[in-house]
Amino acid sequence: MEGVSIESDIREFLASRRAKITPQQAGLPAYGTNRRVKGLRREEVAMLAGVSVDYYVRLERGRIAGASEEVLDAVAHALHLDEAERAHLYDLARAAAKRPAHRRRARGPLPDSILRVLRSMTDSPAFIRNGRLDILATNSLGRALYSPLFHDPTAQQPNIARFQFLDPLGRDFFPDWEQSLNTTVSLLRTEAGRAPHDNDLTQLIGELVTRSEEFRTAWAKHNVRLHHTGRKSFRHPAVGVLTLDFDALDLSAQPGLTLTAYSAAPGTPDHDALQLLAAWAATEIASPPTAPLPPTGATDEHDSSRRP
């Protein structure tokens, strides 16, 4: 499936980053106004990286397997790559060389100790996901917050990306649609670099590329990102719009899995909405199924009202 072809991903990623850098940003003189390319030329990147033009052209064509760390660092510097983009370039180089990712990925069910920690977080919605954005386990408040993702009893495993792009409820649930869309796609693009041979990930991306024009357009931009902290808005069917701070923590004992927890500062309308959500959960979800759904297909690759 072309969505996760290593050679094409390397080619398109480097070309898209090159197109974003102007000569002025790179500290180069710009002669004339009729440049035939958007951003830097290949020969300009080669000069900035200290490599021959022929060698850089080979890199941009996807032949990056034998590139040294020094060359990758020089290219990243020339293209002004941020932390996430630099890590993605290294992931693509490892995949091209058929070298395993730094960490093995978790297999099997989640340990009971992690589930106990998750369930003990009674004041914060929290959940555990994998790199494909499958929700593997939630606490009670997390289940309540993401309740629209659980509305289909036939779905074996809720997936944030599939819900967002393919479920009619997805667009309404994420009011900051463009920002949320770009974040989701960037996270999947990052994961595709880490785990290019994850069959479940490949199938998910293929499904989304085929069925969603919005996903297909965003996927072609080759944007990647790290997603450790920030703010996210939801339009919940019971409590209305609430905007929460989030912190995402990698589970070092379960490589490839992330625990995300949401919170709101006391005394704010969003904190009040969170308390309202907890009350709703206590009355509407009598026995929330907080047990995890076992991770499947894991591989070793690495102003709206708040009233109900």
Image (tube, helix red, strand yellow):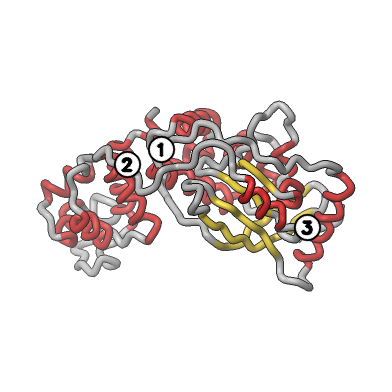
Question: Where is the N terminus found, in terms of image quarters?
Answer: top left
* Residue 209 appearing in the image: no
Q: Residue at x 75, y 40 (%)?
A: 289
Find residue 76 and report its image quarter: bottom left
In this rendering, the answer to whether 251 lies above or below 272 is above
Find residue 168 and report its image quarter: top right
Q: Are marks 2 and 1 in contact (CB under 8 Å)?
A: yes
Count residues near mark 2 (Cα–Cα under 10 Å), then give few for <14, some for 14-19, many for 20+.
some
- Is 143 situated left or right of 101 in this image? right
Which disc number belongs to residue 304? 3
In this rendering, the answer to whether 306 lies above or below 172 is below
**In terms of secondary structure, where does tag 1 sit?**
loop
The number of numbered badges drawn on the structure is 3
The amino acid sitting under disc 1 is: Asp
Which disc number belongs to residue 100? 2
- Is 98 situated left or right of 277 in this image? left
The amino acid sitting under disc 2 is: Pro
**In terms of secondary structure, where does tag 3 sit?**
loop
The amino acid sitting under disc 3 is: Ser
Q: Residue at x 53, y 39 (%)?
A: 214
Q: Residue at x 72, y 37 (%)?
A: 150
